[in-house]
């Protein structure tokens, strides 16, 4: 049996001088346009003059062993080669940007020339001809090592075995193969430094979310606890040289912790320093690492250094899913909910199973499903390739599964519309209605599983997402049916009462799930920060005024009165509020820095 080859990178930060030769060589090798980078260097400065230090971190694709981008790509434009390289074929890409949501490292971007996704591919064309990647060849300090990590005779394998190395976000479970020697937490943990509008030698592109130090979203204590629970071995350092990371008040450097005086906590001051540590080798861990309290204190010290991001590139992932996506989740909810409730009402005898009435409901559902399809195609960078999702499917991707669910639902709706208006009784047969209800529910909830494949968006990883998507479809369907019935559209009058009840139940469940997903403690700092931006950041008006007051409080109050006119108003308000919530939920997590 042939030996397994598993290529990876090691960046030796002890040698890196931040010269950007790797960036330039990469762009020249691949003829990349201005403004996008497959590899780039981030500068972090720490300390206070004259005791300052600048750290360089080379950022790129991690070529993960369990790569989320390959799972979520609907057309297998991304795939893992047998030698461990995650390669990319722009000729297959449809530009859906799902891979950009799936990658926790911001390694992918949309190439403005080809209008397809792109990333570091380990210079696979050079590797196939026996050469090293361009960045390795050009580095003047030999700070970049590339090679087979499984071969004990390679320099990269020896370095990983002998040195204490660190990987970015190992807690994501992606098994990254980009390691750093002497990695700095201020560089590898994005939340420890704020994005600025102006850097020392560059300006942030207009699409980048910048964060001022006066609004510290970073929860230092929570980040320290998360770091302590990971596999990262925590290194020691000179306490006198360690400053703070959050850019808070000048005395303490921290508006997030409880120290309040600018002095280190007693426990932190008395903590024994640990030996320098890293990630990836058993030898790197020390006996003190087994003490969870000591690890938390040391992690706090590491992160409690005043770090400033002084050079970076614009994150290409920023809001890659825009208005088309949060509009699509809204129209899809209306389509799914209308079909679901109509089928259930007739299946359980709440309303008479009339073919024409069901056909009218199916027609409304099909119109919003068509709008959903249009929005999905509009969001593609290569809209003429949309059919490849069905013809070249990657069955690991929920985007593919969702596309087939929508296609089957569309075919069923066509049957219901034509058959119903022709008076075919089979349309309202219990089996047909059961199929309709199942398709409505599937159409509603599949997006939750697509979002769960987006490893880069921690707030979307909620286990309650499928139930929440279902509740939103009940709200959307109930509100639509109530409005149609109250305004006098033939066939919908009988549905006003049960639809209003469904709307009220959906609103209550929606409120409970919003509270659980937004206001309860989150497992990661990125999720916590995204929730904070929804409730206290720039999304607060849309969330509180639109999503809560207009979308929940006022509709429930209107429904409580019991007037048909107010029930219709409640439906309209609920739909508007649901759109506001979708905007916040889809957009806010995309403003979190990944690199």
Image (tube, grey):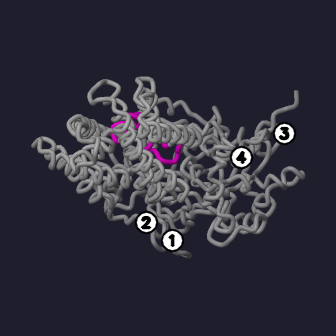
How packed is label 4: few (under 14 Cα within 10 Å), some, or many (20 or more)?
Answer: many
- Using residue 456 as the reference point, say whether residue 91 is left or right of it: right
Q: Secondary structure at mark 3?
A: loop
State whether residue 295 appears in this view: no
Q: Which residue is mark 4?
A: 86
Q: Do the residues under discs 3 and 2 have CB atoms within 8 angstroms? A: no
Earlier-in-chain disc, 3 versus 4: 4
Our reading of the magenta stretch's main secondary structure is helix
Q: Cα distance, mark 3 to mark 1?
A: 43 Å
Q: How many marks?
A: 4
> Mark 3 or 2, which is nearer the eye?
2
The picture places residue 126, in percent across and down from the top left corner, at 84, 55
Q: Cα distance, mark 2 to mark 1?
A: 8 Å
**Which range is magenta?**
451-472
- Using residue 43 as the reference point, say whether residue 31 is left or right of it: right
Q: Secondary structure at mark 2?
A: loop
Q: Secondary structure at mark 1?
A: loop
The numbered dot on residue 204 is 1
Q: Find residue 350 and report its image quarter.
A: top left
The picture places residue 90, in percent across and down from the top left corner, at 72, 56
How packed is label 1: few (under 14 Cα within 10 Å), some, or many (20 or more)?
Answer: some
How packed is label 3: few (under 14 Cα within 10 Å), some, or many (20 or more)?
Answer: few
Q: Residue furthest front?
A: 422
The numbered dot on residue 210 is 2
Q: Do the residues under discs 2 and 1 have CB atoms within 8 angstroms? A: yes
Q: Residue furthest left?
A: 561
Looking at the rendered image, the quarter that the N terminus falls into is: top right
The numbered dot on residue 153 is 3
Q: Is residue 292 above or below residue 481?
A: above
- Residue drawn where x is 54% and y is 50% of the image: 101
Earlier-in-chain disc, 2 versus 1: 1
Earlier-in-chain disc, 3 versus 1: 3
């Amino acid at each position: 049996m042939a030996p397994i080859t598993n290529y990876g990178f090691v960046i030796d930060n002890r040698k890196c001088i931040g010269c950007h030769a790797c960036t330039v060589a990469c762009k020249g090798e691949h003829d990349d346009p201005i403004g996008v980078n497959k590899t780039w260097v981030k500068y972090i400065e720490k300390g206070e003059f004259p005791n300052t230090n600048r750290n360089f971190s080379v950022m790129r694709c991690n070529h993960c062993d369990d790569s989320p981008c390959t799972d979520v790509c609907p057309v297998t434009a991304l795939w893992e080669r047998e030698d461990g390289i995650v390669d990319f074929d722009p000729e297959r890409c449809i530009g859906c940007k799902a891979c950009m949501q799936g990658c926790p490292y911001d390694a992918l971007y949309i190439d403005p020339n080809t209008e397809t996704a792109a990333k570091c591919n380990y210079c696979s064309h050079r590797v196939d001809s026996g050469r090293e990647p361009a960045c390795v060849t050009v580095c003047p300090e030999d700070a970049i090592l590339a090679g087979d990590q499984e071969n004990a005779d390679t320099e990269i394998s020896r370095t990983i075995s002998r040195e204490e190395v660190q990987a970015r976000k190992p807690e994501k479970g992606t098994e990254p193969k980009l390691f750093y020697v002497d990695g700095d937490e201020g560089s590898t943990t994005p939340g420890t430094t704020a994005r600025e509008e102006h850097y020392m030698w560059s300006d942030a592109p207009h699409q980048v979310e910048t964060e001022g130090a006066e609004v510290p979203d970073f929860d230092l204590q929570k980040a320290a606890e998360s770091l302590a629970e990971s596999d990262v071995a925590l290194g020691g350092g000179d306490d006198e040289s360690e400053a703070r990371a959050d850019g808070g008040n000048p005395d303490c450097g921290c508006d997030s912790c409880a120290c309040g005086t600018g002095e280190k906590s007693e426990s932190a001051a008395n903590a024994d320093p640990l030996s320098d540590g890293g990630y990836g080798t058993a030898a790197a861990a020390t006996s003190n690492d087994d003490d969870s309290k000591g690890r938390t204190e040391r992690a706090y010290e590491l992160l409690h250094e005043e770090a400033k991001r002084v050079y970076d590139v614009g994150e290409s992932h920023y809001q890659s899913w825009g208005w088309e996506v949060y509009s699509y989740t809204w129209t899809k909810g209306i389509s799914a909910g209308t079909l679901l409730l109509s089928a259930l009402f007739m299946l359980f005898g709440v309303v008479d199973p009339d073919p024409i009435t069901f056909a009218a409901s199916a027609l409304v559902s099909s119109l919003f499903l068509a709008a959903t399809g249009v929005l999905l195609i509009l969001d593609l960078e290569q809209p003429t390739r949309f059919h490849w999702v069905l013809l070249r499917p990657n069955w690991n991707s929920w985007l593919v599964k969702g596309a087939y669910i929508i296609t089957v639902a569309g075919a069923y709706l066509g049957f219901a519309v034509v058959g119903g208006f022709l008076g075919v009784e089979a349309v309202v047969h219990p089996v047909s209605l059961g199929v309709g209800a199942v398709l409505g529910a599937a159409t509603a909830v599949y997006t939750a599983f697509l979002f769960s494949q987006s490893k880069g968006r921690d707030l979307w990883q909620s286990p309650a997402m499928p139930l929440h998507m279902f509740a939103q479809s009940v709200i959307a369907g109930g509100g639509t049916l109530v409005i149609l019935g109250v305004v006098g559209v033939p066939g919908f009058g009988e549905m006003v009462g049960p639809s209003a009840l469904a709307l009220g139940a959906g609103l209550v469940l929606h409120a409970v799930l919003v509270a659980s997903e937004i206001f309860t403690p989150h497992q990661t700092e990125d999720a916590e920060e995204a929730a904070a931006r929804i409730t206290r950041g720039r999304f607060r008006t849309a969330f509180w005024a639109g999503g809560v007051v207009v979308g929940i409080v006022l509709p429930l109050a209107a429904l409580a009165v019991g007037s048909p006119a107010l029930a219709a108003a409640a439906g309209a308000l609920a739909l508007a509020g649901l759109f506001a919530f979708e905007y916040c939920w889809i957009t806010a997590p995309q403003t979190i820095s990944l690199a």
